[in-house]
Amino acid sequence: MAKLTVRDLDVKGKRVFLRVDYNVPMEEKDGKMIINDSTRIVETVPTLKLLIEKGGRLILTAHLGRPKGKREASMSLAPVAVKLSELLGKPVKFVDDCIGEKVESAVAAMKDGEVTLLENVRYYNEEEANDPGFAEKLAKVADVYVNDAFGAAHRAHASTEGVARIVTRRGGKAAAGLLMERELKFLGDELENPARPFVVILGGAKVSDKIKVIDRLLEKADTILIGGAMAYTFKLAHGVKTGKSLIEPDHKGTALAAEAKAKTLKVNFQLPTDTIIATPVDTGKLNKKGKPVYDLTNIRTVSGDIPDDAEGFSIGPETAANYAGIISSAKTVLWNGPMGMFEDARFAAGTNAVAQAVVDATQKNGAKSIIGGGDSVKALNKAGLGDKVTFMSTGGGASLEFLEGAVLPGVAALSEK
Ligand code: ADP
Ligand code: MG
């Protein structure tokens, strides 16, 4: 999959329509919207600098939140323009619309190397509908199309797909930005022919969320390590009692089929041998969402059945040690899905042990370590290990779909090299 990238582009004097992911968390303070975490803006800077150096005229488009086709002041990208200007050390012009006369005249006044950010593209319902007329309006200011928003590439929206198609139909180029290029390299190319042993760690809440990924990776991996709540459906399928744990009884067959496939393909497929459980006790209180609040009492480790009144929250220490040993000799590691409810420190040890093993494999064994999935990335950052792996996807849902082997519309629309 060799997609054209910004490195290959000649953009001198051209209007570069650049789709970025500026969907940053914001909070209202004294009537003003403040950006809580600028990571996504910071991450686009290398792509922007490269295009600025090459003399392009950058027109940035992004979405923020879910304004559902209305002009929601709290979802304006105006604060992002201020932050971006700081990061680039140069002015960033903000236009309070993404189509129409205002945009066209602002762009007409641009010089080479200048940057303009357009207002939230989701102020129009036509964006998510991938309305062809709307895409044409966006594309009015596009000579070249660049997509650096991998996290939005699994959706065929006007700014992620429609504009790219229009630009290429006119004979222009549509290319991946540097962030997108890295996502395609690590989640795509690197996993096509991975250095072996290739160990895949899969966790998270549900088998049904991950079964397509399991199915595809069974064809590539040497070992698959299962953790998180997902493991309980496998256990249930083997007749082990799972108490109040998160399970999907309808997916027992799915779980058994995956194990059977692993056997046929001679993949070392491992389930946890111990589990950290707790007994939930109703406090009689309700949380903000109106759901009952439970105290998790009597936290302990079991290796077999989970008692009827108890719930599993993580892999146990024996499993963590076993998994860490296997991971340490890997040459490629792919990790998607935490090993337990890591958000609660009492159940984070298993996830943290696996995170440390992935880091050790990377640093001591020269393994390539690739982390996909929003919560997995959070878990690694929470453990303070985010910068010690080879690659962490920015994609969330998009990375999961990509790992399933799906063709992402935002990627498919880019020009081939
Ligand atoms: P990712 O976003 O990395 O793909 P998922 O969304 O599939 O991961 O799963 C992450 C969520 O699964 C976390 O919020 C975590 O608390 C939850 N989880 C993992 N194990 C358990 C468990 N044993 N019981 C309850 N929740 C769990
Ligand atoms: Mg998640």
Image (spheres, rainbow, N blue to C red):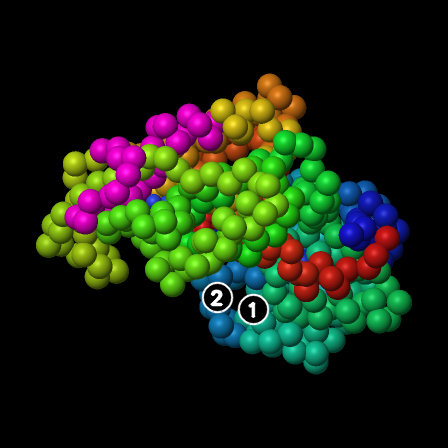
Is residue 251 something that shows in the picture?
Answer: yes
- In x, y percent, where is residue 305? 26, 42
Say whether residue 78 is left or right of residue 146: left
Q: Does the Cβ of the disc 1 residue fall within 8 Å of ligand 2?
A: no
- Picture layout, residue 412 above or below residue 222: below
- Return the residue nearer the eye: 33 or 126: 126
Mark 1 residue type: Arg
Q: Which residues are magenta?
A: 300-324
For residue 207: magenta? Answer: no
Q: Residues within 10 Å of mark 2 (few under 14, many from 20)?
A: few
- Residue occupied by mark 1: 122
- Picture layout, residue 388 above or below residue 228: above
Q: Residue at x 69, y 37 (%)?
A: 194
Q: Residue at x 46, y 30 (%)?
A: 323
Q: Residue at x 86, y 64 (%)?
A: 172
> Is disc 1 in contact with disc 2, using a CB cutoff of under 8 Å?
yes
- Residue occupied by mark 2: 66
